[in-house]
Amino acid sequence: MKTKKSNLSKDDKMSKFLYDNINNTTMVMTCDYIQSYSNSKDEWVFHLNYKDNKIILSYNKIWLVFELKYKLSYTQIQAFVGNWIEKNCGWKGFTPHHLGQS
């Protein structure tokens, strides 16, 4: 049986992955300058730090996928995610980092 191969480019696949993980979240906590977001399984996905202008992503849920599946370096992930969140979420000036490396 043949499997259907996607016609999406690597960038389109990465964009879809990020969209599925960022846009399907709910803000679960906010304090002075941090907003935390979880998915429908109540698993932490990311938080925005307005004081330091950082978006901190779950290592296991997001960052690791970019490293292993898409073979991106740390700086390539930062550039892709930074550009994507600015374009698609309107979060300008946030630098992506990760938390929770296993």
Image (spheres, rainbow, N blue to C red):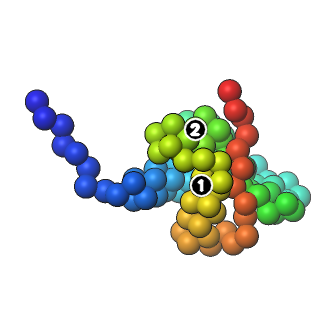
Q: Residue at x 43, y 58 (%)?
A: 11
Q: Is residue 102 above or below residue 43?
A: above
Q: Residues within 10 Å of mark 1 (few under 14, many from 20)?
A: few
Q: Residue at x 70, y 44 (%)?
A: 98
Which residue lies under the disc numbered 1?
76
Q: Position of residue 26 (x, y in %)?
A: 61, 51
Q: Position of residue 76 (x, y in %)?
A: 59, 55
Is the C-beta separation of discs 1 and 2 under 8 Å? Answer: no
Side (left or right) of 26 relative to 1:
right
Label disc, if present, on residue 64 of the rendered structure: 2
Q: Amino acid at mark 2?
A: Leu
Side (left or right) of 9 relative to 51:
left
Q: Secondary structure at mark 2?
A: helix
Q: Nearer the viewer, residue 23 or 74?
A: 74
Q: Quadrant of the N terminus?
A: top left
Q: Residue at x 69, y 72 (%)?
A: 92
- Is any part of residue 3 visible from this angle? yes
- Is any part of residue 20 visible from this angle? no
Q: Residue 60: which quarter of the image? A: top right
The mark closer to the camera, 1 or 2, is 1
Q: Nearer the viewer, residue 30 or 82?
A: 82
Q: Residue at x 65, y 54 (%)?
A: 75
Label disc, if present, on residue 6 of the rendered structure: none
**Number of numbered discs overlaid on the protein picture:** 2
Q: Quadrant of the C terminus?
A: top right
Q: Residues within 10 Å of mark 2 (few under 14, many from 20)?
A: some
Side (left or right) of 84 relative to 29:
left
